[in-house]
Image (spheres, rainbow, N blue to C red):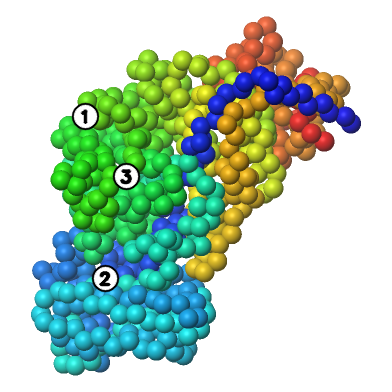
Amino acid sequence: PEYTITLDPAATGVEIPDSMYGVFFEDINYAADGGLYAELVRNRSFEFLPVDHPSFTGLTAWTTTGTTADDDGRLHERNRTYLRLAGGQSLTNAGFNSGIALTAGALYDFSVWAAGAAPLTVTLHDAAGQALAAPLTITTRGAGWAKYTGVLRANRTTDAGRLTVAAGGADTLRLDEVSLFPRETFKNRRNGLRKDLAEKVAALNPGFVRFPGGCLVNTGSHEGYDAASNFERARSYQWKDTVGPVEQRATNKNFWGYNQTYGLGYYEYFQFAEDLGAMPLPVVPALVTGCGQNRATDDEALLQRHIQDTLDLIEFATGPATSTWGKLRADMGHPKPFALTHVAVGNEENLPDAYFARFTRFRAAIEARYPDIVVVGNSGPDDTGATFDRLWELNRAAGTEMIDEHYYNSPAWFLSHNERYDSYDRNGPDVFLGEYASLDNKLFNSLAEAAYMTGLERNADVVRMASYAPLLANVDHVQWRPDLIWFDNDESWGSTSYQVQKLFMNNVGDRTVPSSLVGPGLEPQPITGAVGLSTWATAARYDDVRVTTPGGEVLFADDFSAGADAWSPFTGRGAWSVVDGAYTQSDTAAQDTMVRGADITATDYDYSVKATKLSG
Ligand code: AHR
């Protein structure tokens, strides 16, 4: 078959912003500790608790005859549990995944906080006890807490190392924050990022970094509706918990069901964005839970504190080194401001009016103090539906500058929705497509995403930014798929979707050129004759199928790849209607996989089907 592409180079399409494509980092799939954050010691501060995960304790990943304690002898109020280690005792850390990854000849920075006086011997070895580095000897002094450091050089490459600290002498030591970092990190930052992973992100050439979530931000926590939870576990992600000296940072239960150390915190996120040449885009909790939980706080004092925290965050990023929070940034090593221009409030809230009321409070406070900051709202958890429609209506009426949209759909959906943004109001809010992916990591998914991205670029006057999600997945802890980059403790690899993102992100044009494509199979193809359900179930390459029953009911499906033996009349979202047996819904809204129903059988209906043939 012959196809004709017509281009009009003289015609001016829309401009594409340099920051069109970015990345969304969320600590899901164990993406931070044991992932992007380069720390090699797991549970370094003995803070894991069963509340983080039923199998966790203060000694998770450790083997020791020492004992944990949580009392007034602690290192810091936010780093509560420490280890008591008597002379003759030792403790061994098993690292992440299969162990501590070491490269022959590379240097590793060891550090520990200790109180008491004793000789310590630090060794790297394999599970059988074979040495992986010459031992390091440290002598601790005095009764008070102090930090001790030393360097080890690996003599062998392995992905299964162990770290052991053995105490001599007569004192019982208090130990905390036992840490081992590769000397070589991304851009060689201290407390830095794992080089191969950060370099894979850098190779995407992202225009922005959205962080830290996602559902991570505003849910999975009682904090959103309980004012009395300061410094308790399982509170929502709050940036102030994540800055300052690492040994004084809180750890917390992660929304995704494990402990997060906050070693990778807001300062490190801002630094990473700067190192990538990307715009940082933090997301703060809106005090309305989303992600399947529907609750909103009515605690006015808590809401005000979070609004103030957000103002303080902007000061932390952009304020002078003489300001309260700007000084903390300077003390942490970055006197110059970070280039913060956007702040997003909330993520996927299901209570549109409750969310919007709180968003409005955040926005008013931010705009009053920082009129140049763009406050990004969102449109709930889906690409359509009542929450989505209501949030768009509220945001449009309020003149919100930018709205975050999220959707994870079938490849067929992405192929058939290329025109989604063609009809968006050019005078309404800009779109930030903060999360999207076609639901698998196969080549067909990435091709569907690539096709869809051409529609994003054609509408770059409305869709100003877009990021695939999630970014990272630890192969031993996959909680969500598909993902862009996969890793274990010493290797990482991009999915085919990663290659598509890389291709688009490194070749952002200045503007689009209007074009058209004509050829066989591109127009809607009538399918004649009766089509039975077995045909449907295998018709994976037909999309946007409408079925009119003799009774005038309209059945609809946009993904036939799931084998099915029975389908019910469409009862889903959006403004569907049937008038005199005719289908009246437009192509661009409310498309969904057909609802399966046990009470409908293949013999119930005769079908007349018209389908858009996508390929094959
Ligand atoms: O990207 C994974 C999750 O998907 C995000 O946390 C959430 O925002 C969405 O539902």
Q: Spatial distance from mark 1 to mark 2, Cα to Cα? A: 38 Å
Name the spot of residue 176 as percent of width and height, x first. Answer: 24, 73
Which element type, helix, strand or loop, lies under badge 3? loop
Is 80 drawn above or below residue 520 in the view shown?
below
Mark 2 or mark 3: which is in front? 3
Query: Of label 1 and label 2, which has the lower sequence position?
Result: 2
Query: Of label 3 and label 1, which has the lower sequence position?
Result: 3
Query: Of label 2 and label 3, which has the lower sequence position?
Result: 2
Side (left or right) of 252 relative to 118: right
Tag 1: amino acid: Arg
Image quadrant containing the N terminus? top right
Picture quarter containing residue 453?
top right
Q: Badge 2, how many Cα within 10 Å: few under 14, some, many 20+?
A: many
Which element type, helix, strand or loop, lies under badge 1? helix
- Asked if residue 344 shows in the view, the reply is yes
Residue at (23%, 65%) from the top-left corner?
247
Residue at (19%, 65%) from the top-left corner?
80
Name the spot of residue 204 as percent of width and height, x first. Answer: 54, 48
* Tag of residue 338: 3
- Along the viewing direction, whichever of 468 and 610 lies nearer the viewer: 468
* Tag of residue 549: none
Side (left or right) of 340 relative to 488: left
Name the spot of residue 450 as percent of width and height, x first. Answer: 65, 39
The residue singled out by tag 1 in the image is 369
Residue at (55%, 62%) from the top-left corner?
492
The residue singled out by tag 2 in the image is 177
Tag 2: amino acid: Glu
Mark 3 or mark 1: which is in front? 3
Tag 3: amino acid: Phe
Residue at (71%, 39%) from the top-left corner?
561
